[in-house]
Image: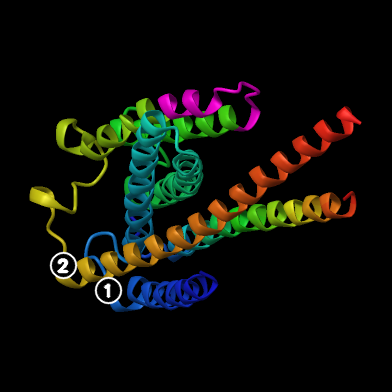
Amino acid sequence: MKRGFTILGIVTALLLSIALYTALAWAPTEQTMGHVQRIFYYHVSSAWTAFLLFSLNFISSIVYLVKRNEKADIFALVSAEVGLVFCTVVLVTGPIWAKPVWGIWWDPADIRLNSTLALWLIYISYLILRRFSTSSRIGVIAAVWGIFGALDVPFVFFSIWFFRTQHPSPVIAKGGSLDPKMWIAVLINWAAFMCLAWLVCWTRYRLEVAQREVHEAEAMQSLMEGAR
Amino acid sequence: MNTNPLHYLYAAYVATWVIHGTYLYILARKAARIRKEIEKLKSSG
């Protein structure tokens, strides 16, 4: 287990270094936007990673509701938390990219931007709910919240197909016209971020298990002290 | 449109790592707190 974690750590560090090189130096410079387009590699990779983590939260929430499996509950929490970190990266790098290209930081009428912000707010509220609720049924409440929250993920993803938006066309499926080298660079960056997400989820999962064990031990200890 | 606004590019990359770094720092503090709680439990028997 410890060896697997170390190997994953080394692979992640290597992939992140290669990803940084491909994004900043190896990938060709886009003709219209110039070097600023290289934000794309971090922005899009982070968005895909966040979507995947929120989808895992959705699956874990269903598993928890059906089986009442504690591991699924912990994984739901972990995937939402790490997904939120990647979603924050998307929301920060997006406006930094938009300013030099569109001339504005944020377009208040843009459905892609607003639905991504809504997604971020949904998972912030999910984590606040989990953090501060004193209900014994918080696992169930959070799972239901996670399932409904995840419905925004396909809405964000497909919004550029269905609505007129400032946001660039999708790079996958019909709308995509990426240079092959750009494709390779974005896939390497996505792989690196996926490994980072896996590593952080693993760490966070172990922390959550340890924290729950400590709380259980504390509760047992106070029960025993009360019985004396 | 400015075609070479490198400072925006650097800002985006730095911001990404500041966000990840902040989260990792929060996790490290959490781990330290849990370790302390375990020590406390062990010492109290």
Q: Residues within 10 Å of mark 2 (few under 14, many from 20)?
A: few
- The amino acid on which the numbered mark 1 sits, given as a three-letter code, is Ala
The region drawn magenta spans A131-145
> In the drawing, does residue A59 fall left or right of residue A221?
left
Discs 1 and 2 lie in a common subunit: yes
> In the drawing, does residue A36 fall left or right of residue A83?
left
Label 1 SS: loop
Nearest to the observer: residue A11 or residue A138 = A138
Question: In the rendering, at what x and y percent does residue B43 appear?
Answer: 89, 54
* Residue at the (82%, 56%) spot, across then down: B39
Q: Which secondary structure dominates the residues rendered in magenta?
A: helix
Circle 2 sits on which residue? Answer: A179
Q: Is residue A8 above or below residue A211?
A: below
* Residue at the (44%, 44%) spot, across then down: A91
The chain ID associated with circle 1 is A
Pointer 1 and pointer 2: residues touching (CB < 8 Å)? yes
- The amino acid on which the numbered mark 2 sits, given as a three-letter code, is Asp
